[in-house]
Image (cartoon, rainbow, N blue to C red):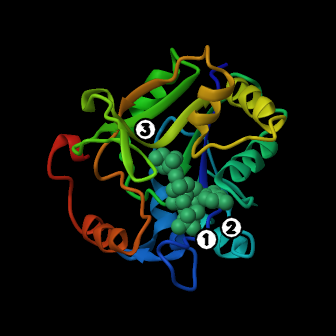
Amino acid sequence: MAARTVAVVLAGGTGQRVGGDLPKQLIEVGGRTILAHAIAAFDGHPEIDEVLVVMAAGHERAAAAIAAPFRKAAGVIEGGDTRTASTVAALTALDGRPDGTRVLFHDAARPFVGRDVIDRVLDALGVHAAVAVGVPSPDTIVVVEDGVVVSMPPRETMSRFQTPQGFRLGTIREAYALALADPGLRATDDCGIVHHYLPDVPIRVVEGCERNLKVTRPLDVVLAEHLAATAPLTREDS
Ligand SMILES: Nc1ccn([C@@H]2O[C@H](COP(=O)(O)OP(=O)(O)OP(=O)(O)O)[C@@H](O)[C@H]2O)c(=O)n1
Ligand SMILES: C[C@](O)(CO)[C@H](O)COP(=O)(O)O
């Protein structure tokens, strides 16, 4: 039997950098909430079986109302204090599922992830146990310590990570089991956990897209409104 595929939409944050009374995933752009856009991207993908939403504490009812119309919505659970803790909540909810289950973790704050990007992650998951989405950096990226440049990695080796990040469930479970036993645990994403705690597991990077922006600051809400109203400009934007 083919492995099931679960998309986890991480909406456990409170959107402090955007500000306002509500978490940013509850803001409407183009007539629907950012959270609804993110759920819709996975609900509409033929290879996704279930969409699990991890929501900020106190907003689960709002998230359940948003998720209800979607056919593949599999529930709303409460998130944790950090993105990592929200992923752990999802992994706990997936306890008992087979190790071969494919699980995609996506930032609810990225409302415009395209079908092509999800396709590329799923294709790569056929071969690799861990898959990331990256886009090249148009800027030079430098490492700065105490206000001084300490290194300038070659730009062509730099990639800006997006989501979804895809894993075989057994792999991400094992990585988090090791991470949770480490009092020094620090990571900004799930691939960071695999990279750090399972260094022998290669993380395949597939091409992302500039439309798949993360709504992080107030200007991003303006950009998201614009993107919601416009079609992709090029194939790379789709
Ligand atoms: N405790 C948390 C923190 C973040 N996230 C999710 O992880 C994604 C990326 O996080 P970020 O953009 O940093 O969102 P916030 O934490 O809400 O933003 P801020 O740091 O500005 O408060 C978002 O979809 C967010 O909801 C989560 O599920 N649980
Ligand atoms: C996972 C991520 O979107 C990859 O770029 C990013 O690391 C999330 O960071 P945040 O600080 O939680 O927004």
Q: Position of residue 23 (x, y in %)?
A: 57, 74
- C-alpha distance separating marks 2 and 3: 24 Å
Asked if the residue at label 1 sits under 8 Å from ligand 1, the reply is: yes
Q: Is residue 221 above or below residue 109?
A: below
Check disc 2 and report its element: helix, strand or loop: loop
Q: Residue 53, located in which quarter of the rendered image?
A: bottom right
To which residue does mark 2 refer?
56
To which residue does mark 3 refer?
118
What residue appears at the point 74 percent right and 70 percent down from the top-left corner?
57
Circles 2 and 3: CB atoms closer than 8 Å: no
Asked if the residue at label 2 sits under 8 Å from ligand 1, the reply is: yes
What residue appears at the point 65 percent right and 62 percent down from the top-left corner?
12
Closer to the N terminus: mark 2 or mark 1? 1
Q: Position of residue 165 (x, y in %)?
A: 52, 37
The residue type indicated by label 1 comes to Thr
Check disc 3 and report its element: helix, strand or loop: helix
Closer to the N terminus: mark 2 or mark 3? 2
